[in-house]
Image (cartoon, rainbow, N blue to C red):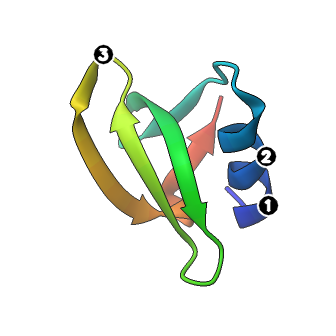
């Protein structure tokens, strides 16, 4: 996924199907300079992590 699209999804406030390593995730914030996204697993919001945006896939 591209950084700009990840940022758009994070700002939408709607659920957009995005996966990371096969699991549905929610994008909370995108650091454009570092090209990293702060995400959490959709069904487990306590499992927050920071991952490279390029590893996210929009479904």
Label 1 near label 3: C-beta < 8 Å? no
Q: Which quadrant of the rendered structure holds the N terminus? A: bottom right
Q: Position of residue 36 (x, y in %)?
A: 50, 68
Mark 3 secondary-structure assignment: loop
Label 1 near label 2: C-beta < 8 Å? yes
Q: Please, which residue is most extreme toward the bottom here? A: 33
Q: Residues within 10 Å of mark 1 (few under 14, many from 20)?
A: few
Q: Earlier in the sequence, mark 3 or mark 1?
A: 1
On screen, 40 above or below 42? below
Q: Position of residue 42 (x, y in %)?
A: 38, 22
On screen, 5 above or below 41? below
In percent of the image, x 58 and y 74: which residue is there?
A: 35
Seen from the viewer's position, the closer of residues 57 and 45 is 45
Mark 1 secondary-structure assignment: helix
Label 2 near label 3: C-beta < 8 Å? no
Residue 9, quarter of the rendered image: top right
Measure the alpha-carbon separation of dots 3 and 1. Answer: 25 Å
In percent of the image, x 68 and y 51: which residue is there?
A: 6
- What number is the disc on residue 4? 1
Q: Earlier in the sequence, mark 3 or mark 2?
A: 2
In percent of the image, x 58 and y 60: which residue is there?
A: 30
Left/right placement of residue 4 relative to residue 10 reads: right
On screen, 45 above or below 34? above
Q: Which quadrant of the rendered structure holds the C terminus? A: top right
Left/right placement of residue 25 relative to residue 46 reads: right
Mark 2 secondary-structure assignment: helix
Which residue corresponds to mark 3? Answer: 43
Which residue corresponds to mark 2? Answer: 8
């Amino acid at each position: 996924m591209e950084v700009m699209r990840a940022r758009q999804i994070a700002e939408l406030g709607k659920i957009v199907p995005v996966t990371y390593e096969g699991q549905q995730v929610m994008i909370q914030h995108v650091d454009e300079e570092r090209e990293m996204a702060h995400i959490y697993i959709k069904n487990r919001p306590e499992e927050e992590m920071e991952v490279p945006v390029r590893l996210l896939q929009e479904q």
